[in-house]
Amino acid sequence: MSEQKLVRELPACPVETTLTLIGDKWKVLILRDLLSGTKRFGELKKSIGNVSQKVLTSQLRSMEETKLINRKVYAEVPPRVEYSLTELGKSLKPILDAMQNWGQWYKDLLK
C-alpha cells in the first residue's frame, strides 16, 4: 500500500487513527514483545499465546505495511525471519507504558 493511499484511508480523528493502527489486541501484544528487541515468528507466537499462525501472520503483515515493524528474511534453509520495531514503532512506547500503568492501577483498585 502506498503511503499516499494509507494517509487517505486514515480517519480524521487522531485517536481513531491510533486505534486503527494498534487497536487490535494482537497488535498491542506484538508491540509489547518487540519493545524488548528482535524476535522470530515462533518466539512471538509462544509469547503471545492463544493466537493462530494465520492471524499472527496477518497482523505482522499489516504492521509491516503501516511501517510499525521491520521483517528481515535470511537466505537460509529453512528460512529464518526476524521482526523488529521501526523507529515509528518504537515511538509507541510511551503509549504502551501508559496502558500498562493504567492497567496495573485498575487491577490494584479492584483488590
Image (tube, rainbow, N blue to C red):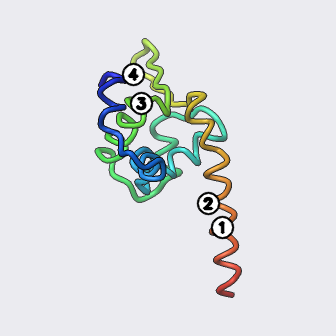
Label 4 sits on residue = 78
How far apart marks 3 and 1 lie (CA) works out to 28 Å
Sooner in the amino-acid sequence: mark 4 or mark 1: 4
User: Which residue is nearer to you in this view: 36 or 109?
Assistant: 109
Picture coordinates of residue 88, whole percent (x, y) = 56, 31
Label 2 secondary element: helix
Q: Image check: 100 left or right of 24?
A: right
Q: Residues within 10 Å of mark 1 (few under 14, many from 20)?
A: few
Q: Residues within 10 Å of mark 4 (few under 14, many from 20)?
A: few
Amino acid residing under circle 3: Glu
Residue furthest to the bottom = 111
Q: Residues within 10 Å of mark 3 (few under 14, many from 20)?
A: some
Contact flag, marks 4 and 1 (Cβ < 8 Å): no
Label 2 sits on residue = 99
* Disc sitting over residue 64 in the figure: 3
Q: Nearer the viewer, mark 4 or mark 1?
A: 1
Amino acid residing under circle 1: Trp
Picture coordinates of residue 74, whole percent (x, y) = 46, 16
Label 1 sits on residue = 102
